[in-house]
Amino acid sequence: MAGNETGHGAIVRNRDLIDVWIEAPRGNRKQVVYEKILSLIDITDEPSEHLKSNIMKCSQLFGLKMANKWQKVGQSRNRLLQNQVYWLDKIIYRINNDSEENTSSDEEQEPPCCSVGRRRVPFEEASKKTKRRRVAELTTDRSANELQFAVNVVSGSNHSEVSPQIFSFSTAEALALMVDLDISVRKYLLLRSVINGKAQNCLPSYKELQNTKNAILPSQYIITEISAEVDLQELVQKTAESILEIINFEERDCRIKVICKWGFDGSSGHSQYKQKFSDLENTDEFLFLVQ
């Protein structure tokens, strides 16, 4: 399979090197493959250091791939020939006649070696991370309208209108929705899964909702087995801050008055349960609430 081909020069394929690699001692395989490649490209003059370096790199790369495939086929030459036909016929080294004539020039061209790395996956089959990396150059300094118009052009659509942009719920909006609907955590996660399946990242995660809720709730409170107390000043402060974040005020000096009211209520006659208190004098029969 090696030799001179018209217009292409010397070509070496993986198939030309497997026998010498198998027969060579383990510690000397790279050198044996290197010498085999030199003999196949049939260079009459003394090869340059640049050419020797390139051939040695190809020899080393071939050895790594061959060792891996040799292990997979159970060190069977027949199975290697049957299962690795595509790889065996792959060109590992090529040197053009024109390049060989120019080896003495200052700008010596490096002969192409076999390709390294994984196979390039089609865009549709790639992961989200790979897709973002591939479109990074396209999205730089480009607006959403420009990209959408480009999509319409590529898809053959004559409509220049931009599809309506899908907005995501903020954590505050999603938290308000959850409270207004009075739904459990399980129902919110189910709702989020369905909506985000249609519009990606429309509803935030429940953990983000928890962080937002903790930010607007008082941080100082006292809880015992018969009472729960919250600092009134902090409660009013947190409530006022939440209202101010929702309302968009113009950038000007203004005075805002927050009017609050409080009261209390009580109830009695509750059913008593068998839950025991640390203090035997405590009871849950009566309830007094200040708000």
Image (spheres, rainbow, N blue to C red):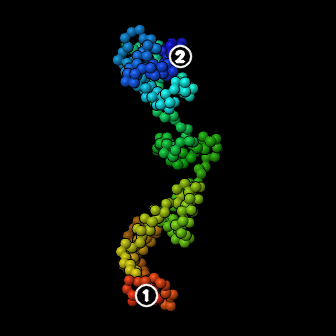
Q: Pick the residue in front: 62 or 193.
A: 62
Q: Dot 2: few (<14), some (14–19), or many (≥20) neighbours within 10 Å?
A: few
| Badge 1 amino acid | Thr
Whether 268 is drawn above or below 128: the answer is below
Q: Indicate the secondary structure of the residue bearing disc 1.
A: loop
| Observer able to see residue 99 | no
The residue lying toward the viewer, choosing from 115 and 175, is: 115
Alpha carbon of mark 2 to alpha carbon of mark 1: how far?
A: 95 Å
Q: Position of residue 255 (x, y in %)?
A: 39, 74
Q: Earlier in the sequence, mark 2 or mark 1?
A: 2
Which mark, by number, is residue 1? 2
Query: Residue 258 is drawn in which quadrant?
Result: bottom left
Numbered label attached to residue 283: 1
Mark 2 falls on what kind of element? loop
Which image quarter: residue 48? top left
User: Relative to the observer, which residue lies in front, 282 or 77?
Assistant: 77
Q: Position of residue 44 (x, y in %)?
A: 41, 8
The x and y percentages for residue 111 are 44, 20
Task: Name the kind of residue labelled 2 in the image.
Answer: Met
Residue at the (53%, 37%) spot, across then down: 121
Tags 2 and 1 touching, CB below 8 Å: no
Q: Write down the quadrant of residue 146 in the picture.
A: top right
On screen, residue 40 above or below 240? above
Q: Quadrant of the C terminus?
A: bottom left
Would you say residue 66 is visible in this rendering? yes
Residue 219, x across and y down, in percent: 37, 72
Task: Kindly identify the residue that appears in the image at 51 percent across and 87 percent down.
Answer: 271
| Residue at point 40%, 21% (across, down) | 25
- In the image, what residue occupies the spot 51% across and 15% down? 2
Query: Is residue 184 depicted above or below 72 in this figure?
Result: below
